[in-house]
Amino acid sequence: MKNKELFIFDLDDTLTESKVVIDDEMVDILAGLLSHKQVAIISGAWLPQLKLQVLEKLPQRLDDIRKSRLHIFPTSGAAFYRFENGDWCPVYELRFTDEEKSEIVEKFSDAISKSEIEMPGQIYGERLQDRDTQLTFSALGSEAPLELKKTWDPDRQKRTKVHSIVKELLPQFDIAIAGKTSIDVLRKGVDKAFGVEMMEKHIGILKSEMIFFGDALFETGNDFPVVKTGIECVEVKDHEHTKRILKDFLQNIDGDI
């Protein structure tokens, strides 16, 4: 990994648990990594969620140089933000139209009915959340407790069934299973592979100099498109696994200085 210049991370179950603020140990690790390398976070989460989980905590530990090395790609690469003039400013945003949003909501309702899957009676937050550049279906709702999310679809069978139906109903969009209970909808061709292409274009680092860490590299997962880019990928089990890998890396690289 020493020859890689851009370290790319998924968020939930890679840097932290689902919808949970990154812990102090991960903040220290990322701050240490940013002393040596550039870092990009690409997630199905939208910018307000990324601010809550990462950006309200990590940048407080960074000087201006390290802040400039941190690149944020919400909604699987449909937008890119960098820190400028004291705030996170958009480089690009690929937003859905109101007509597209309405069609996605309608077709998702049809897909759930056709799947014949029994949906939870209690919903926490929004079941279909509008994230501007992405729409995300969350079976238990966008604010569901983590412990409930862990038990609803651990083998992804329920979401795989809905996913296959939605793909047929919305062939003009890309559909991907994400997180513990979610399915993401993005513009066709806008996925984490697209995000990697945008990183190469806007950050100016070759794909051969990138490395990606994620937990959903299986075929229907929202990290899987990264595999097709040809960059080196590291599949992690959870954020503690990521910590172990990065701590070993930082010990080795700091020892060489």
Image: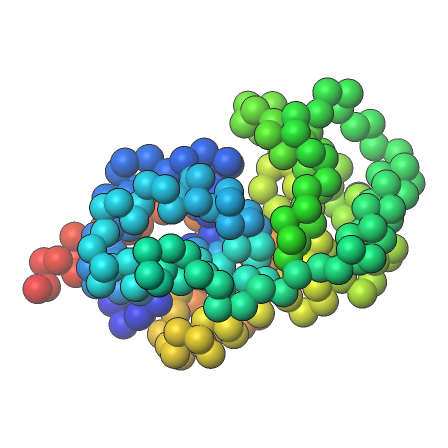
Residue 212 falls in image quadrant: bottom left
**Point 43% across, 40% down: residue:** 53
- Which of the two residues, 86 or 119, is positioned nearer the viewer here? 86
Spot occupied by residue 145 in the image (x, y as percentages of width and height): 56, 24
Q: Quadrant of the N terminus?
A: bottom left
Residue 117 visible in the snapshot: yes
- Which of the two residues, 84 or 203, is positioned nearer the viewer here? 84
Q: Quadrant of the C terminus?
A: bottom left
**Point 44% across, 61% down: residue:** 89
Spot occupied by residue 9 in the image (x, y as percentages of width and height): 42, 55
Spot occupied by residue 84 in the image (x, y as percentages of width and height): 35, 63
Spot occupied by residue 250 in the image (x, y as percentages of width and height): 20, 54
Residue 57 falls in image quadrant: top left
Q: Is residue 90 left or right of residue 252?
A: right
Q: Is residue 253 above or below residue 203?
A: above
**Point 68% across, 42% down: residue:** 129
Q: Is residue 107 above or below residue 73?
A: above
